[in-house]
Image (spheres, helix red, strand yellow):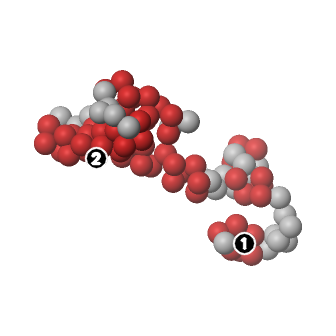
Amino acid sequence: MLKKEVKDTLNLPDGASNEYLFGHRKQGCIGLPIAAEELELNPIDTAFKLLTLSDEIVSNEALFPLAHTVSKRIRRTATDSDIEDYLFRISR
């Protein structure tokens, strides 16, 4: 829906290449961020920030649901290594 609106605003035909919209501005494109990539990175960034806070109460509140999710997925109590592997896999 966003692509269509941007194309309409720029008076581009519906069949115009989306590469023009998402390509880098240094290459003469518009440089719109791809929403799917942003949606994948934001939760990871937020989780990292919460887990690494100096406030132990907040970081523990973030760690508990993460450890619970990992434990459910691997069907055993998650270790720090398991949590690290899980976060690495979802970030790829």
Q: Which of these two is toward me, 52 or 84?
A: 84
Where's residue 22, x and y in %? 70, 53
Residue pushed farthest front?
75
Q: Is residue 78 left or right of residue 15?
A: left
Image position of 49 (left or right of 56): right
Picture coordinates of residue 80, whole percent (x, y)? 31, 26
The amino acid type of the residue labelled 1 equals Lys
CA neighbours of label 2 inside 10 A, class few (<14), some (14 to 19), many (20+):
few
Determine the residue positioned at 74% across, 52% down: 29
Query: Compared with residue 6, is residue 56 higher up or lower down, i.e. above or below?
Result: above
Q: Within 10 angstroms of label 1, few (less than 14), some, or many (20 or more) residues?
A: some
Taking depth in this image into account, of 21 and 51 the one nearest to the observer is 51
Look at the numbered disc 1 and give the secondary structure of its residue.
helix
Give the quarter of the figure containing the C terminus.
Answer: top right
| Nearest-to-viewer mark from 1 and 2 | 2
Please give the residue where the numbered disc 1 appears in the rendered image: 4
Residue under pointer 2: 65
Callout 2 secondary element:
helix
Residue 70 image label:
none
Estimate the spatial distance between the alpha carbons at disc 1 and disc 2, rounded to whole Å: 38 Å
Type of residue at label 2? Pro
Dot 1 or dot 2, earlier in sequence: 1
Residue 45 rendering spot, x and y as whole percentages: 40, 43
Tell me the quarter of the picture where residue 57 sits: top left
Residue 53 location, quadrant? top left
User: Residue at image x 74%, y 75%?
Assistant: 8
In the rendered image, which quarter contains the N terminus? Answer: bottom right
